[in-house]
Amino acid sequence: MVRRNQQKKRDEARAKKKAEEQVVEAAGNYVPLSRDECQERSYTAELGSGGLL
């Protein structure tokens, strides 16, 4: 039987380990698209009759 304090410490240790694993997984797994697959974006917009976007 696990005591309350031991169970709390064990759960905290598991949560910490899981959080560290997620940080490691999130670091550096982005691979950008090749230039051939990219699309040009237009950042201009026409003004309406009131001079607003």
Image (cartoon, rainbow, N blue to C red):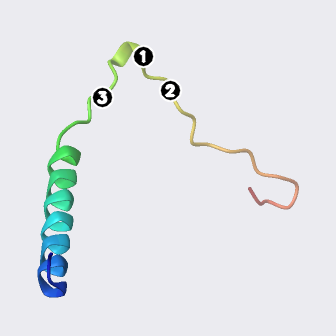
Tell me, yes or no, whether the two marked residues, 3 and 2, touch with CB atoms within 8 Å.
no
Q: Is residue 1 left or right of residue 34?
A: left
51, 11: nearer the viewer: 11
Q: Position of residue 32 (x, y in %)?
A: 30, 28
Q: CA distance from mark 3 to mark 2?
A: 15 Å
Give the quarter of the image for residue 29. Answer: top left
Quickly name the residue at label 3. 32
Tell me, yes or no, whether the two marked residues, 1 and 3, touch with CB atoms within 8 Å.
no
Q: Position of residue 17 (x, y in %)?
A: 13, 60
Q: Residues within 10 Å of mark 2 (few under 14, many from 20)?
A: few
In the rendered image of this protein, does residue 37 appear above or below residue 41?
above
Q: Position of residue 36 (x, y in %)?
A: 39, 13
Give the quarter of the image for residue 15. Answer: bottom left
At numbered mark 2, what does the secondary structure look like: helix, strand or loop?
Answer: loop
Quickly name the residue at label 2. 40
Quickly name the residue at label 1. 37
What amino acid is labelled 2 in the image?
Glu
Give the quarter of the image for residue 19. Answer: bottom left
In the rendered image of this protein, does residue 15 appear above or below residue 6?
above
Marks 3 and 2, the one that precedes in the sequence: 3
User: Disc 3 or disc 2, which is closer to the eye?
Assistant: 3
What amino acid is labelled 3 in the image?
Pro
Q: Residue furthest top?
A: 36
Q: CA distance from mark 2 to mark 1?
A: 10 Å
User: Disc 2 or disc 1, which is closer to the eye?
Assistant: 1
Q: CA distance from mark 1 to mark 3?
A: 10 Å
The residue that appears at 17% across and 74% down in the rendered structure is 12
Q: Is residue 41 left or right of residue 28?
A: right
Q: Residue furthest right?
A: 49
Q: Position of residue 42 (x, y in %)?
A: 57, 35
At numbered mark 1, what does the secondary structure look like: helix, strand or loop?
Answer: helix
